[in-house]
Image: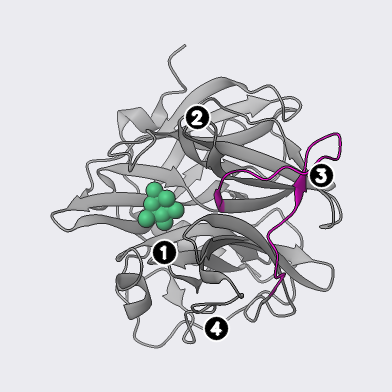
Amino acid sequence: MSKVKMISPEVKNVPWQEKPEGLKGAPIWRYSENPIIGRNPIEGVARIFNSAVMPYEDGFIGVFRGEQTNGIPYIYLGRSKDAIHWEFDSNKIPFVDEDGNPFMPLYAYDPRLVKVEDTYYIIWCQDFYGASIGMAKTTDFKTFVRLENPFIPFNRNAVLFPRKVNGNFIMLSRPSDSGHTPFGDIFLSESPDMVYWGKHRHVMGRSSEWWESVKIGGGAAPIETSEGWLLFYHGVSGTCNGYVYSIGGAILDIDNPSIVKYRCENFLLTPEEWYEERGFVPNVTFPCATIHDSVSGKIAVYYGCADSYVGLAFTTVDEIVDYIKTHSHLTESDTEIGRR
Ligand code: BMA
């Protein structure tokens, strides 16, 4: 039984490995068999990474960023019994518009998968006169209906909350440029209907900590806990050899998630294994989902590695919340509720 409560279903078959002996200080530990998805996983797809998974029926389901052999990313559906070994559909997800006509964006990447009430939402980055957010919904993982784009360009990083707050859907996003964006803070927007988005608020900015001094962006769908919304996000540092993407952690106010209660000044995980440091884009750890069990307090974090692989790491809600609180450092830009 955990001290901190996660307000979410029990997931008995959450993937899990105990923390290795002697791993001092680190609040998250990697799965020893990482990466869980290697190169060329589907015919015509060179790499799968930055992907989101969740429990479904008696197993798990996920939406995967598949980089085709022509270099263009699309989203593929995958299923698993244990959330470690995955089987993928050989074709990309066939989105349709609200009239049932085929809709396929020019490209689609970094999908998130979030269930709100009885509907599963997929949120990703696609072209709309530059990088923008695309969305679709499904209730059966057979028909995927494209929704209106929530935001105008440019924006490439959106994460939906798993329940409405004060009656509205809540989405984090990171406005950007159309290129490799040398800046970026996390903002929050609300919607009564998943069509019209407003009440935009600033949540948190890139910080003075070196590991996240260039830009930050939402990661996994926030986990509701008795301490607030637990958010795993990515933070980017600029080096003379390019960007380095690490995983960070914060806890947002439960009723007003634009307020940051705690924000960890240390990264939780940074590239250091071969599959994180070496690949199509070296030095990237990019969280997109968690699977978590409210009874045991176990959390499995899914993250893209070096734009080439999917990795899995573990923590518990007690350990991660304690670590974030112990190492919390807030700045003025984390606590404002947004300039009107
Ligand atoms: C970001 C996104 C991610 C990617 C990262 C590192 O801008 O495009 O998909 O993992 O760059 O290349």
Task: Report the amino acid beneath label 4.
Answer: Gln
Residue 129, numbered circle: 2
Q: Which residues are magenta?
A: 88-110
Disc 3 crowd, CA 10 A, few/some/many (<14, 14-19, 20+) = few
Task: Report the amino acid beneath label 3.
Answer: Glu
Q: CA distance from mark 4 to mark 3?
A: 30 Å
Viewport quadrant of the N terminus: bottom right
- Residue that mark 3 sits on: 117
Q: CA distance from mark 1 to mark 2?
A: 24 Å
Q: Quadrant of residue 203?
A: top left
Q: In front of the other: label 4 or label 1?
A: 1
Query: Which residue sits at x=36%, y=67%?
Result: 280
Comes first in the chain, label 1 or label 2: 2
Q: Residue furthest front?
A: 70
Dot 3 lies on which element? Answer: loop
Task: Report the amino acid beneath label 2.
Answer: Tyr
Say which of 304 and 26 sits in front.
304
Residue 129 percent across, percent down from the top left: 50, 29
Q: CA distance from mark 4 to mark 1?
A: 24 Å
Q: Which secondary structure class fits the magenta region best?
A: loop
Q: In front of the other: label 2 or label 4?
A: 2
Q: CA distance from mark 3 to mark 1?
A: 32 Å
- Residue that mark 1 sits on: 307
Whether residue 234 is visible here, answered yes or no, is no
